[in-house]
Amino acid sequence: MDRRSENDIRGTAAEDILRGSSHALTIFEPTAIRALEIFTKLGKPYLKCYVTGKDRLAKPEEIVRQLYVKMLMDDYGYPPERLAIGGICTMVFPALLTSKGRASLLSATTSRSPSRELKNKPWHRRQTVSDPIKNRYEFLCLFDCENGNPNGDPDAGNAPRVDPQDMHGLVSDVALKRRVRNYVQIAKDNRMPYSIFVEHASNLNRPIARAHEETEGGLAADRKGAGKDKVELARQWMCRNFYDVRAFGAVMSTGPNAGQVRGPVQLAFARSIDPILPLDVSITRMAVAENIPGAASSEDYEKWEKEQPEDHLRTMGRKTLIPYGLYAAKGFISAHLAQLPEGTGFSEDDLNLLLEALLKMYDHDRSASKGVMSVREPIFVFRHEGTDSDPVQRAQQAKLGCAPAHKLFDLVSVDKKAGIEAPRSFADYAISFRQSALPKAVKIGFVVLGDDGHAVTVWDEIPPELSHVRVF
């Protein structure tokens, strides 16, 4: 039975108790601090322990201890019973309350990267982000469209985008990034640190304002521009918590201002392998949508319908599509732009999620206008690793790259099979990869979907199920 009565409880801020003490709350999110319930019992401030559920005297060291406990539970997935083993709540955390202990935990938690032991535990459910990537990458993704419009051009009546000089089809980088965002939003429940900044039908200034609220100093009440340091704190918060900001970058200088971010992941316009044939098809809708003057009820509309000839109750429409097109999308990933603190922190986990999203981006984006769109395995990934015997120089080579991107892309060939004049399926193409010409400092990865539905990258050896890809 709860020993607290209504008369015993009154709101007390944790900041008030810590004011004037040697303990700081700078590494904790303001929401976590506000969520810590402080109540009064027998004239003294108390709190309820997150591990034992018991009331504890809310001394400054106890407040900080409970915030660390909450961080381990929420951010790293530790269950309360594990934190109670061996008296960790009362024996280990006092050591963390020193400045050295705080610095140690802050360093360990900044990357949000759990240990290998923690990752293998079934109770580890919290979404985490690993360390920033250390290698430059390029990737090539093949996808096709059958009897649909892969990317409409608003300036051309939403007809399929084409290069007017050679009639090759185009798909914008914005369209591809939209599909990646949509998949990540579904797969990760739009939860931090995988939230999506550029959402459908949203005001981008809302998350920017929250970035100010959640960082030191809060959201300024006046309309004066935020200072440089405050903008940088908001920028870092946005990078930590929004996947698309970490990957693609963003202009966040609107509203309260969170600066601008150059994203390490960049996509070019996808281009069809062969010319496409845009078709403008007539369709019939067996109904109309007329505004009837004077109609005040459904009976009035029904009466009007009965008075009309049948031909007046249907209408014609248009639909644009292509019979078939195979497209190649090329992407570039900079390790330099991922490095903290200036970069976004784009990590190997983020990279794996990007490749998975590319493979599955059309599986959750079906519509009649798109026809049948499919990403074709594998995605070709080039990872720069370097060859220098000195580890420092080799790491620098891996970060800056060891070969021009266009030479790596040229190793992949996509050609029509003999006798095919107008391709109408993926089977009409022959795919080949010249692995013998791959630079020694670069590894090739073939990305496919595993049995569990997640992306799997097989390095240096073509998976046996990809028999349609010739490697020589």
Image: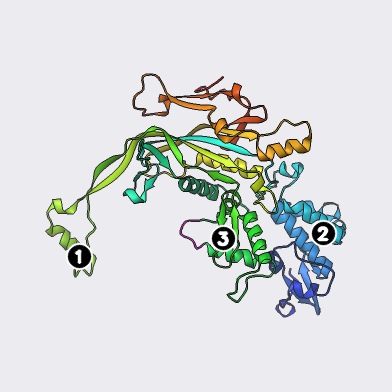
Q: Which residue is mark 3?
A: 252
Residue at 63% x, 55% y is 239
Image quadrant where residue 145 sits? top left
Q: Earlier in the sequence, mark 3 or mark 1?
A: 3
Return the residue nearer the eye: 215 or 387.
Answer: 387
| Residue at the spot 73% in from the left edge and 62% down from the top edge | 28
Q: Mark 3 and mark 1: span between their CA atoms?
A: 46 Å
Report which residue position mark 1 lands on: 292
Mark found first going from the N terminus, 1 or 2:
2
- Mark 2 sits on what residue? 102
Quarter occupied by residue 101: bottom right
In the rendered image, residue 311 lying in the magenta stretch gets the answer: no
Q: Nearer the viewer, residue 60 or 37?
A: 60
Q: Which secondary structure lies at badge 2?
A: helix
Viewer-proximal residue among 185 and 260: 260
Mark 3: amino acid: Met
Residue 73 seen from this side: yes
Above/below status of 470 relative to 330:
above
